[in-house]
Amino acid sequence: MSASHHTPPSATPGLIPTLATVAALLLGYAMLQMGNTLQGTLLAVRGGEEGFSASTIGLVGSGFFAGLMVGSLRVGRVIRAVGQTRAFAALAALASVVPLLHLMVMDPVAWVLSRALTGFCFAGLFIAVESWLNGASSSSVRGRILGIYGMTGLIAGVGGQLMLPVADTSGFVLFCVVSMIISLALVPVTLSRAQAPQMAMEESSLNIRRLYRQSPFGVVAAFLCGVCTGAFFSLGPLFAKDVGLGASGVAIFMALGSLGGFAMTWPLGWLSDLLDRRRLVVSVTLVATIVIMGMMAFTPTHAPHWLFMVLVFIFGGLVVPTYSVVLAHVNDHVAPEEFVSASGGLLLLQGAGAALGPLLGGFLMEGMGPRGLGWLIIAAQFGIAIWGLFRMRQRAAPPVKEEFQIMPALPVGTELVAVAQEAAIERHETEAQAEAEAEAIDAWQSEGGAIAVLERPKAGN
């Protein structure tokens, strides 16, 4: 007599099935990023054409990051209340209206408020997307899915920047294009048959003071990284225009800054796993300082445009990946169960720096011309280097390191909720796996006992 075998639990979906499930969501996210980057570059250029001062344009950029921070802290409860799909649709619809407000009301105060509203909406959109991706993917493929998500955002963002020359920046067409792109992001998401997973999002406690005690270098460096990237992405288009680049040149200038960061993220991450991460960050920031000084040496003398393109590519390759290395350094000093709160705290600090950077950079550019932006970035990069050298004398590098992970160069604010949700998902998966293993053991023991009884020789045989 043969015994029946215990049926193992069904395998979790692999990469391809999961990717097919979230493909529509990724397409919608790509459109959002395309519209977002085009809008940011367009506002900086159009603001200059409308006679806005550099400080005003910087304030507009700061408004976006301020709205992003507020949204990342507040909009999570809206998503929990109505679900990812409805929240995505409502916020995308609202975000698509804002570009038209910029066009209708050419007033600095209105632009700052409108840009803050955009930041708030995009914080919610990013949270909805990432929480959806976290819930739809198992732990075995989640890292790769989020990697594809990051790649999608990068490619779409560069594509959005390169759309600037499509129409005259002094007209209304580009504002309408931004609005249409963001509106079209609704189509694949709302028509998708894939259901948004109903997963609890557990808020992570943020303790900046405790985080500073654990990693003084990481706290300061994260804030200054935000200052650099926030200032560059908000005021970089104005800088490029002031040094003589046209619409096409501005678009390529900004795109190369992003592509440089993408090209150098993996090499710097690999090096950071081999070296003291602080030593690497110090070296990178010092080289970035030299690159910015070289760029300033040709400003505003209208040097060959190709030279600015080469320098901004190198600049992006050095500055954009720095935050990921800083986060890895902080994770080296905190317990695994504190990774979520550490990530959220650093993103909050980076967001504060990104909100302050455009404001300071705008005032400096107003008084010093395009070189003002360079001086701000030099000060922030040099500050990271000096602080890193000081901290290296106070504490040795940890003997054991956590694995390097790519993080966004700009604070989308999602990890304040979505990373916490990922921890909750992993905890639920661990509990479910433990229960399944316990049931399998019980079933095996039960079947094993039955088999032993059936196969026991009878007396007299």
Image: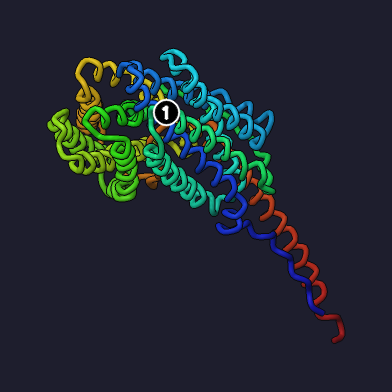
Q: Quadrant of residue 380?
A: top left
At mark 1, the secondary structure is loop
Crowd tier of the residue under label 1, counting other residues whose Cα lies within 10 Å: few below 14, some 14–19, many 20 or above: few
Q: Which residue is mark 1?
A: 171
Up-down relation of residue 386 to residue 10 (above or below):
above
At which x and y percent is residue 187? Answer: 62, 42
Locate residue 112 relative to residue 216 in the image: left or right.
Answer: right
Residue visible at 63% across and 56% down in the picture: 12
At which x and y percent is residue 264? Answer: 30, 47
At which x and y percent is residue 279? Answer: 22, 39
Locate residue 44 relative to residue 435 in the image: left or right.
Answer: left
At which x and y percent is residue 158? Answer: 39, 43
Nearer to me, 54 or 360:
54
Quadrant in the picture for the C terminus: bottom right
Quadrant in the picture for the N terminus: bottom right
Nearer to me, 303 or 434:
303
Three-letter code for the amino acid on which mark 1 is drawn = Gly
Residue visible at 44% across and 21% down in the picture: 66
Residue visible at 44% across and 31% down in the picture: 39
Up-down relation of residue 145 to residue 316 (above or below):
below
Residue 398 seen in render: no
Q: Residue furthest bottom?
A: 461
